[in-house]
């Protein structure tokens, strides 16, 4: 009697997911770079936050959230710790958080991606859905940045050039 093993094919590996996310982060970094310093902190359309505040939000979510997932800490989200004064402050912190993201992401086992985690004590979803939220939130805010840049007469980077 012969048995046949069932092979489960995976759509994407965790390494590919991280590469995809970091590609988005590379593109968002280029959007930050495209802003004139003053406009990065002051320009707004329709009452939306300036892009510096949106970038600070993204910085305040990614690394701290992954650390929370690893430490199983459901602490509340806060932007209070990072108050950039210059574009260089934002870019420096962005690069530092890239290292933090890589560090904590590497500690998530394949099994943990399926575990439910109450992110920031508010968003109870499987870990993989929380990570997809980080990417979705970044794409959403980057779209706002594209709108701002176009309104300022600045051509934003091509959205498909992520590396």
Image (cartoon, rainbow, N blue to C red):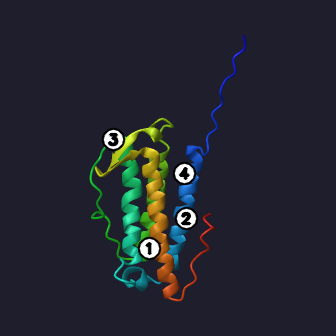
Q: Residue furthest front?
A: 1
Inter-mark Cα distance, 1 to 2: 15 Å
Q: Which mark is residue 88?
A: 1
Pointer 2 residue:
26
The quarter in which the N terminus is drawn is: top right
Q: Is residue 23 above or below residue 7?
A: below
Depth order, front residue of 154/97: 154
Please state which of the two labelled residues, at mark 1 or mark 2, is closer to the viewer: 2
Question: How far apart are labels 4 and 3 at the CA level?
Answer: 20 Å
Helix, strand or loop at disc 2?
helix
Specify few, some or many for label 4: CA neighbours under 10 Å numbering under 14, 14-19, or 20 or more: some
Examine the rendering and report whether any part of residue 108 can be seen.
no
Front residue of 108/94: it is 108
Kindly identify which residue carries mark 3. 72
Name the residue: 51% across, 68% down. 28
Write down the residue under mark 4: 18
- Identify the residue shown where x is 44% and y is 57%: 134
What's the distance in space between the residues labelled 2 and 4, CA to CA? 12 Å
At which x and y percent is residue 35?
48, 81
Instruction: Identify the mark nearer the N-term, 1 or 3.
Output: 3
Q: Verify CB contact (< 8 Å) between mark 2 and mark 4.
A: no
The image position of residue 90, as x and y in percent, is: 42, 70
Q: Earlier in the sequence, mark 1 or mark 4?
A: 4
Task: Kindly indicate whether the residue at mark 3 contacts the one at mark 4 (C-beta within 8 angstroms).
Answer: no
How far apart in space, not on screen, are marks 2 and 3 (Cα)? Answer: 28 Å
Judge the density around disc 3: few (<14), some (14-19), many (≥20) Cα neighbours within 10 Å: few
């Amino acid at each position: 009697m012969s048995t046949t093993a069932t092979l489960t094919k995976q759509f994407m590996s965790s390494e590919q997911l991280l590469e995809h996310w970091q590609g988005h982060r590379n593109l968002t970094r280029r959007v930050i770079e495209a802003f004139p310093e003053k406009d990065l902190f002051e320009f707004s359309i329709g009452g939306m936050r300036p892009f510096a505040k949106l970038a600070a939000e993204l910085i305040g979510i990614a690394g701290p959230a992954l650390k929370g997932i690893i430490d199983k800490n459901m602490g509340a989200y806060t932007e209070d710790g990072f108050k950039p004064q210059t574009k260089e402050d934002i870019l420096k912190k962005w690069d530092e958080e890239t290292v933090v993201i890589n560090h904590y992401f590497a500690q998530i086992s394949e099994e943990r991606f399926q575990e439910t985690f109450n992110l920031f004590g508010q968003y109870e979803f499987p870990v993989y859905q929380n990570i997809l939220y980080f990417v979705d939130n970044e794409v959403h805010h980057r779209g706002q940045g594209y709108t701002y840049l176009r309104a300022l007469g600045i051509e934003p980077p091509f959205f498909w050039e992520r590396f």
